[in-house]
């Protein structure tokens, strides 16, 4: 025979539901912006506009800028998609503080790496680059997910402390 949940079990269940909703809001907003950025102009290079999808597909070839301009930032910012994807997956499948902390670390690395997309435009020897709206939307998608991982990490730690 099933017994009714205790007050602590009910509170725990409510916190888990709240945490899942919060996670879905941050992940959903981040993915929506990321996909949106794929179809926006990410940068202007020598008068030619490049959309985000093309940047994502051809980003591995930005290594040529290292050779030509001694500018590693386009490649570094393209590589930031890898820790972003890892952080996203870890965050999606985590329900504990440790998982949120790991996701936060990957997303923090990703955010710093993606900042290279802005740094490279201000280097004295940079070629004719200029960021466009898609670049900023892409970075915002990463920052939103980073914020979500931080909030979930902090909330879970606070919930654990309140239970003790």
Image (spheres, grey):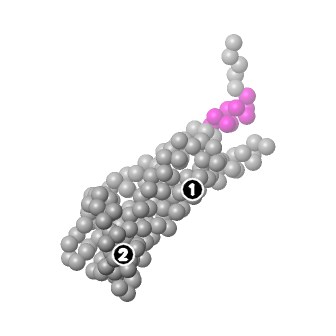
User: Going by the picture, which residue comes out furthest to the right?
Assistant: 164
Provide residue 30's location: percent of width, then percent of height.
Answer: 43, 54
Q: In the rendered view, does 141 fall on the left or right side of 160? A: left
Q: Which one is in front, 158 or 111?
A: 111
Provide residue 120's location: percent of width, then percent of height.
Answer: 39, 77
Report the residue at 65% width, 48% height from top.
Answer: 97
What's the mark number on residue 116? none
Give the answer, above or below, for where 28 lies relative to 45: above
Is the N terminus in the top left, top right, bottom left or bottom right quadrant?
top right
User: Going by the picture, which residue comes out furthest to the front?
Assistant: 67
Q: In the rendered view, does 53 fall on the left or right side of 96? A: left
Q: Nearer the viewer, mark 1 or mark 2?
A: 2
- Looking at the rendering, the stretch of residues picked out in magenta corresponds to 6-14
Q: Is residue 134 visible?
A: no
Q: How many marks?
A: 2
Q: Which one is in front, 58 or 109?
A: 58
Report the residue at 20% width, 72% height from top.
Answer: 48
Q: Secondary structure at mark 2?
A: helix
Graded by Cα atoms within 10 Å as few (under 14), some (14 to 19) or many (20 or more), the crowding at tag 2 reads few
User: Going by the picture, which residue comes out furthest to the left?
Assistant: 48
Which residue is disc 1 drawn over? 104
Report the residue at 63% width, 40% height from top.
Answer: 15
Q: Is residue 126 visible?
A: yes
Report the residue at 47% width, 67% height from top.
Answer: 113
Name the main secondary structure of what is drawn in magenta.
helix
Give the answer, above or below, for where 138 lies relative to 26: below
Provide residue 122's location: percent of width, then percent of height.
Answer: 39, 82
- Please tell me which of labels 1 and 2 falls first in the chain: 2
Q: Which one is in front, 76 or 101?
A: 76
Which residue is disc 2 drawn over? 66
Graded by Cα atoms within 10 Å as few (under 14), some (14 to 19) or many (20 or more), the crowding at tag 1 reads many
């Amino acid at each position: 025979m099933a017994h009714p949940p205790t007050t602590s079990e009910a509170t725990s269940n409510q916190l888990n539901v709240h945490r899942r909703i919060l996670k879905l809001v941050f992940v959903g907003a981040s993915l929506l912006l990321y996909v949106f950025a794929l179809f926006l102009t990410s940068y202007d290079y020598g008068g030619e506009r490049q959309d985000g999808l093309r940047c994502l597909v051809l980003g591995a070839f930005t290594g040529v800028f290292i050779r030509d301009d001694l500018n590693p930032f386009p490649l570094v910012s393209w590589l930031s998609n890898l820790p972003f994807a890892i952080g996203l997956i870890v965050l999606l499948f985590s329900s504990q503080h440790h998982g949120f902390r790991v996701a936060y670390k990957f997303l923090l690395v990703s955010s710093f790496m993606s900042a290279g997309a802005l740094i490279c435009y201000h280097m004295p020897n940079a070629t004719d680059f200029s960021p466009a709206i898609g670049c900023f939307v892409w970075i915002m998608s990463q920052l939103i997910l980073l914020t979500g991982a931080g909030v979930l990490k902090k909330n879970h730690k606070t919930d654990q402390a309140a239970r003790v």
